Image: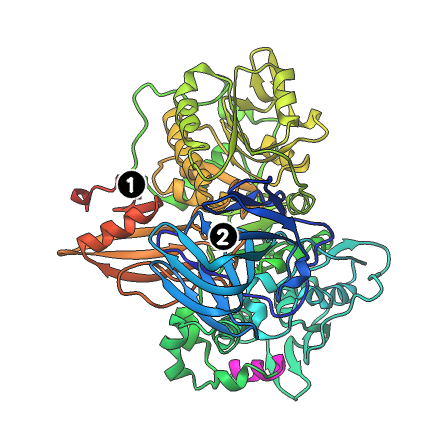
Amino acid sequence: MEGLGGRTTPGGEPTGSTGSDHLQVEFDSSTGRTELEVSDPIERSQFVLSSPDPMRIRSADPDAFRFPADGAVSVRTDRLDLETVVSVCVRDGEGDMIAQAEHFADETFPRGTYSVELFAPIKLYLRVDSSLRVVSDAARTRVEFGEETDVLVGARSHHKRPAATIRTTDRPRDAMRAVSLLGSALKTTSVERSYPTLRGHPPLIERGDRFEAPDGLEPPETDVTIELPETRGHVYAAAPLAYYLGATVVPGDAPRIVTEGGFSHDLDGGGGFEASVERVLKQTFFLDCLTRTEGYYQVDLHERRTLEPTLGLDFADLYDRSIGEQLEAYLDVPYELVESEVPDWKLTAHVAPSASNVEVLPFVANDLAVVTTPQSEPTAGSAVQASAVEEFVRGPPEPTATPPRTGEFTRSASTRSRDARTAGIERTYVQPPETDSLEQAWLGPGIPIGASKASLQAYRNRLTREPIEGDIGITVVCNDPRMAEERDAVEAVYGSREELPFDIRTHYELTVEELRAVLADETEFLHYIGHIDEDGFQCPDGALDVTSIETVGVDSFLLNACQSYEQGMELIERGAIAGIVTLSDVVNSGAVDIGRSLARLLNYGFPIRISLDLACKDSYIGSDYIVVGDGSFSVAQVQAMLPNTGIITRDGEEYLLEYVTYPAAEFGLGSLVSPYVSGNESHYLSSGTIDTFRLSHEELADFLALENIPVLINGRLRWSDTVDFEDL
């Protein structure tokens, strides 16, 4: 994998199909061209393979590959150049892994039949009968063949779509039957399901007046059953675990896991039921990741090497065991022994135990989320009261944050008091408990403080996203000339990545009807700069309320204006997937800083929620912003396969680099990363803090030169191309 030290190996698929009901990848090549562009029109990803000489390209059978592919072509060439360094896995004709090449590799293989996996933003496979050489430097990888030959090139989209819909009543017993079918989407019941590409999207769940499941939709054949009391809270919290284990869920007097072999594990231990489910999910998933190193990808995994002497587990023996037998061995290990090495979890979802939220379960299960079912009710209050809550949560501004300038104006469209402006808006607020997950999502009544306001409609909108023609669309609207500073800053950022085609559209002082038309146009991201109040988006000739629009073409957005929460939620209800909005009035200079930082992070490929988290670290108004919808959505494919950053501190004459990665749509929990730093040969499980490396001045400079990423220095957000070692 490419990256500023980020080389991701998400793993392969020995069995199973993609579950695609239509071709999700496209090959763009004309006769005589030297480039083969592979694109995913749904996930908006692309990757280019090139050759020094024109290639002859023909369509090919995607079933010719060992692993699933959505499409394939045959190219005749003696060499393929990759646009970045990616992890390259070479297998022989029997499918056995014989080499894995990374940065500064030079591997040569004699004439034979080879399968080559390229871990790019789109999963790529090569199949060739020839001699083979894989060579790379710090920036590029090249695959050479002994002579001009026919090379099969296959590709698979990372996009996942449910294969079926289950209908259930509001009875917890029927919800158990529905949750028992979520595991039908697993492409394997081996430990390889810990690879994100082997976890298909669970079937959808809809409410109805009787239970219905499509013919042939069955739970996987595992030896695991989860017994639960008949309450929504128990069923909802256990749904991701049931999905991952392929377990059948049945009523029981007390929550527990039982297997056909007679093993039983109580799910009501220390901390209660939800904490027990969380521990079992994390421990089982983590130890599967260690056990799978006995299989298709026998890499040097840091976490296995660190823990193996103390765990007492025979991974070679466990690899071929049933899930029930693996659980019995895994759960005999005290959680405290593995806790420090478990990756930072992607998501904690606070799901209110309402009947309607049964429809959310496939989406939180797809994320392997930790699910809690909060019982507290939101508190009614004005925006002023909410602001006071925020001030308490965030504490005093960091001394490094730039304070507002004297005489600074806010982005309010009115001189009325905040209470008066929001008098017609009945807001309620809730503060979810803190967790150690990278993201929190609130699925229930009220506006969460410190979490994303998730939405079933946002998840549905993402699933129904359709392929589009053309480049990635970025729309910038500036409806107040006094805010031109932000407009100029973000215009310079969006589309600055040479390897990705962007279509930047900028609009100024739009009328109501002009803005209505812009919101209807298909675009990946809308960056709105201006005023919003209880009447809607303020335009020179009046206000546009999104409730007057039936559907929008905007996938995601930043409404960088005062009090934009309600309008943002209406965009979600009308077709958008995710966005960033404000809960109160924002000072213009702070909004400019947030807008500039978000533009750069989103342009790089960070998911929306992580982008906001990082941008807020360097802003005194950061807690005035909140994510609505699906916070894991990314505007563009990430530059380094996995979003990554570094926290840099000086230690005498050396430097400490805390290397941090975040899950992405393409590479979720279970992906591997091998930081390209001096002396490292290990792979790590993504996500969160991977490790802390001690580097010399020269080694750190080399690392920072690999790729431009955000870094944190003394609590301030910087970019690696601007790091001044004198500041360390």
Label 1: element kind: helix
Instruction: Name the residue that disc number 2 marks.
Output: 439
- Residue at 67 percent of width and 37 percent of height: 573
Pair 2/1: label in front: 1
Q: Amino acid at mark 2?
A: Glu
Image height check: is 239 above or below 443? below
Tell me the number on the disc at residue 721.
1
Magenta-drawn segment = 322-331
Tell me the number on the disc at residue 270.
none
Residue 721 lies in quadrant: top left
Nearer the observer, 626 or 35 = 35
Residue 467, position as x, y percentages in the image? 66, 41
Residue 45, position as x, y percentages in the image? 55, 45
Is residue 323 within the magenta segment? yes
Residue 688, position as x, y percentages in the image? 41, 58
In the image, farthest residue toward the front = 147
Q: Amino acid at mark 1?
A: Asp
In the image, farthest residue toward the bottom = 262
Residue 286, position as x, y percentages in the image? 49, 71
Nearer the observer, 214 or 384 = 214
